[in-house]
Image: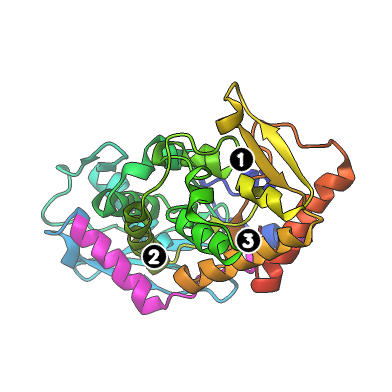
């Protein structure tokens, strides 16, 4: 997961205007504030129009959407006003424009969109025009969303139709830093094949779909597995759609990175490893292998995985890796924990100099 400090800073609320420069002043956040979408203004505007067609197709033509970045890459703003017979929303990004759409629908039309459904019957066929321009500044540059476990609680079973609805909901609520963990097992498979592992080594490593979140964090292995090739193919296809739609809105997807958890077959390489134990799972499923970060192989796996990932899916430079979820590290030494962090960020920046973890 992202560091706790960053997670606390990335909460999203509306508030009255404040200086975005105050947020950027903290030097430790400089790499974070350097993150920005590479999607063009035209593509972001088109994404918001697509959302309107899916949400309120009869009224879509009554909106004018303008994305106008302010050039500072700091403050996120939207303005709602009536221009002629149109509701015009001008915003610094596609996500912020979508948030402006939802603010308008809630405040002027009494509408509501949630995870479980939507209430849009109150939206009139002829939209009411604001009497005067309304400007809103978002409290934070980034609004992070999702928990690593959510992928296995529910998202793992979603098809594109359900993902499309979720990404629309994200955009309407101003989310611009969503977790995007789908399909990483195929990239891990390619990585370990390059290291000389066999399919049989991975069949006892990958957990089943409902348990992948805990597998990814090193809590368990093999439980509910193995994963068939058809699963990997379907997930890769789905992730391409998910990432494209997120990026179309101007979001910055947070994608996985290596956190030391490896197949047991890696122990044959003679590297320094440790067995981690979680809950009351048996040795077969709950004694997972952790590769020490001072090993050359740690860097090789991390670099190989990231290169494979970027070749398949591209990158927006934001990464997540979780070392010890509900587990004790092999040692409480601060030097060891420092190794973990240093080895991870050094490998990331070797492949992606703009990497933020």
Residue 286: quarter of image: top right
Which residue: 89% across, 47% down? 335
Q: Residues within 10 Å of mark 3 (few under 14, many from 20)?
A: some
Say which element carries label 2: loop
* Residue 238 in view (yes/no): yes
- Please state which of residues 245 and 180 is positioned toward the viewer in this rendering: 180
Q: Where is residue 65 in the image (x, y as percent from the top left)?
A: 31, 69
Q: Which of the marked residues, 3 or 1, is nearer the chain's N terminus?
A: 3
Compute the Cα span from label 2 to label 1: 33 Å
* Residue 74 in view (yes/no): no
Which residue: 83% across, 37% down? 331
- On the picture, is 217 further left or further right than 63? right
What residue sits right under mark 3 in the picture? 20
Q: Which of the marked residues, 2 or 1, is nearer the chain's N terminus?
A: 1
Compute the Cα span from label 2 to label 3: 22 Å
- On the picture, is 100 further left or further right than 33? left
Q: In this view, does 175 lie above or below 111?
A: below
Please name which of the two marks, 2 or 1, marks the residue nearer to the observer: 1
Magenta stretch in the rendered image: 27-54
Q: Is residue 270 above or below residue 318?
A: above
Q: Which of the marked residues, 2 or 3, is nearer the chain's N terminus?
A: 3
The circle drawn on residue 218 is 1
What residue sits right under mark 2 in the picture? 249
Q: Where is residue 343 in the image (x, y as percent from the top left)?
A: 77, 58
Residue 140: quarter of image: bottom right
Please name which of the two marks, 2 or 3, marks the residue nearer to the observer: 2
Say which element carries label 3: helix
Q: State the quadrant of the C terminus.
A: bottom right
Q: Is residue 228 covered in magenta? A: no
Q: Where is residue 203 in the image (x, y as percent from the top left)?
A: 47, 46
């Amino acid at each position: 997961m992202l560091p706790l400090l960053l997670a606390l800073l990335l909460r999203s609320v509306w508030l009255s205007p404040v200086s975005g420069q105050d947020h950027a002043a903290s030097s430790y956040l400089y790499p974070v504030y350097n993150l920005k979408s590479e999607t063009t203004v035209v593509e972001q505007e088109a994404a918001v129009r697509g959302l309107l067609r899916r949400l309120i197709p009869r009224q879509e033509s009554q909106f004018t959407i303008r994305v106008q970045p302010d050039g500072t890459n700091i403050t996120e703003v939207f303005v709602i006003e009536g221009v002629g017979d149109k509701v015009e929303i001008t915003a610094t990004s596609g996500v912020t424009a979508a948030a402006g759409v939802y603010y308008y629908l809630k405040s002027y039309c009494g509408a509501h969109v949630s995870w479980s459904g939507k209430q849009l019957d109150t939206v009139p066929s002829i939209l009411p025009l604001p009497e005067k321009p309304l400007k809103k500044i978002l409290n934070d540059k980034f609004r992070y969303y999702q928990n690593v476990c959510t992928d296995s609680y529910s998202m793992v079973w979603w098809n594109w139709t359900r993902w499309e609805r979720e990404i629309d909901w994200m955009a309407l609520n101003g989310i611009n830093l969503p977790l995007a963990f789908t399909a990483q097992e195929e990239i891990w498979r390619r990585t370990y094949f390059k290291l000389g592992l066999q399919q049989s080594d991975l069949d006892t490593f990958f957990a089943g779909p409902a348990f992948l979140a805990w597998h990814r964090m090193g809590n368990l292995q093999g439980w509910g597995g193995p994963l068939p090739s058809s699963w990997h193919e379907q997930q890769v296809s789905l992730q391409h759609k998910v990432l494209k739609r997120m990026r179309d809105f101007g979001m910055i997807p947070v994608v996985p990175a290596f956190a030391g958890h490896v197949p047991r077959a890696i122990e044959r390489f003679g590297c320094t490893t440790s067995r981690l134990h979680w809950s009351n799972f048996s040795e077969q499923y709950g004694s997972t292998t952790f590769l020490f970060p001072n090993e050359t192989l740690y860097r090789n796996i991390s670099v190989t995985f990231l290169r494979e990932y970027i070749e398949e899916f591209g990158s927006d430079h934001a990464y997540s890796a979780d070392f010890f979820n509900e587990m004790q590290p092999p040692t409480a030494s601060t030097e060891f924990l420092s190794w973990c962090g240093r080895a991870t960020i050094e490998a990331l920046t070797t492949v992606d100099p703009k990497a933020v973890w």
